[in-house]
């Protein structure tokens, strides 16, 4: 759907895009095609779409896979979505909040979505930490957040550690704010998460307890954070950092996933 077509539909039903829900409709057809190509979809697969809007992306997904489960939060938009896509028999429509809804998902599925910016972190965490993880996730999100997620030392964060612990993230391309209506204030990026898994050899609860303590005061040295939050032996931590080729003054953002797993050996 073009900008003109979307505006006509909304005007007809006296609806305005809800800023509170982060409603910005993707109107660039090339970007829509790139999202679908990046997801590497197969005819026998199931896709979960979050924040379907009026169905621009939903329609493309339905032509590529066996089934699309699409969830939309807006009470106003949802009836229009169902009306626009009523001729497609492989779409399951759900009106609700993805963070609250209990979905009946198959063991194997992929997530493809143009999500509201505010939803990015909780959505990623929810599905990456779930028992039934998706095979891949292909999301259109805020550019700066995508860059934080894919960051490497010395620019790591709790978010980048979380995402990279469970998956391999990659920025496919950047998307200008002019590709949306209404136009958001920032640019976006297509982010693809592959190799989603839960490392079996690592105690996940202990791992993130250690990482969160390390990032508790980002400006402080890592050794001091771990000592104050977990009462870990400073000398042992300094030795562990040296084995990771890190100085004793290292801060949390300079450590890779592999470095954190090594430090975990000293966290009894």
Image (cartoon, rainbow, N blue to C red):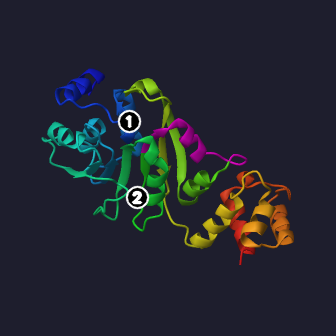
Measure how far apart labels 2 and 1 are at the Cα level.
29 Å
Residue 134: which disc?
Answer: 2
Name the residue that disc number 1 marks: 19
* Residue 202, visible in the rendered structure: no
* Whether residue 248 is visible: yes
Query: For the magenta stretch, what is the residue range?
Result: 139-155
Q: Is residue 147 within the magenta segment?
A: yes
Farthest residue, direction bottom: 268
> Relative to 265, is 112 on the left or the right?
left
Mark 2, Cα crowd under 10 Å, few <14 / some 14-19 / many 20+, is many
Q: Residue at x 60, y 44 (%)?
A: 148
Q: Secondary structure at mark 1?
A: helix
Q: Are marks 2 and 1 in contact (CB under 8 Å)?
A: no
Q: Secondary structure at mark 2?
A: loop
Q: Position of residue 155 (x, y in %)?
A: 69, 46
Q: Quadrant of the C terminus?
A: bottom right
Q: Is residue 144 above or below residue 106?
A: above
Q: Is residue 187 left or right of residue 110?
A: right
Q: Residue at x 71, y 61 (%)?
A: 214
Pointer 2 or 1: first along the chain: 1
In the image shown, does 122 or 41 lie closer to the viewer?
A: 122
Q: Does residue 171 appear to the left or right of 214 in the view shown?
A: left
Horizontal and vertical percent position of residue 204:
58, 70
In the image, residue 92 sits, relative to residue 244, either above or below, namely above
Point out which mark residue 147 bears: none
């Amino acid at each position: 759907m073009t900008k003109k077509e979307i505006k006509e539909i909304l005007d007809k039903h006296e609806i305005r895009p809800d800023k509170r829900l982060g409603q910005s409709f993707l109107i660039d057809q090339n970007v829509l095609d790139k999202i679908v190509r990046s997801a590497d979809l197969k005819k026998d697969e199931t896709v979960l779409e979050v924040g379907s809007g009026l169905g621009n992306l939903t329609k493309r997904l339905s032509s590529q896979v066996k089934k699309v489960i699409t969830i939309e939060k807006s009470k106003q938009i949802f009836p229009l979505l169902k009306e626009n896509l009523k001729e497609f028999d492989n779409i399951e429509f759900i009106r609700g909040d993805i963070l609250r809804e209990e979905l009946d998902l198959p063991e194997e599925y992929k997530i493809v979505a143009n999500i509201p910016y505010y939803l990015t972190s909780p959505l990623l965490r929810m599905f990456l930490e779930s028992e039934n993880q998706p095979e891949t996730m292909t999301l259109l999100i805020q550019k700066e957040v995508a860059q934080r997620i894919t960051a490497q030392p010395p620019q790591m964060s709790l978010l980048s550690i979380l995402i990279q612990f469970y998956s391999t993230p990659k920025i496919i391309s950047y998307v200008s704010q002019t590709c949306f209506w209404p136009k958001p204030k920032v640019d976006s990026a297509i982010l693809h998460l592959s190799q989603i898994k839960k490392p079996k050899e690592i105690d996940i609860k202990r791992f993130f307890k250690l990482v969160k303590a390390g990032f508790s005061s980002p400006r402080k040295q890592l050794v001091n954070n771990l000592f104050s939050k977990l009462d870990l032996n400073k000398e042992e931590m300094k030795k562990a950092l040296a084995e990771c080729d890190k100085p004793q003054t290292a801060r949390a953002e300079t450590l890779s996933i592999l470095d954190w797993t090594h430090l975990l050996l000293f966290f009894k």
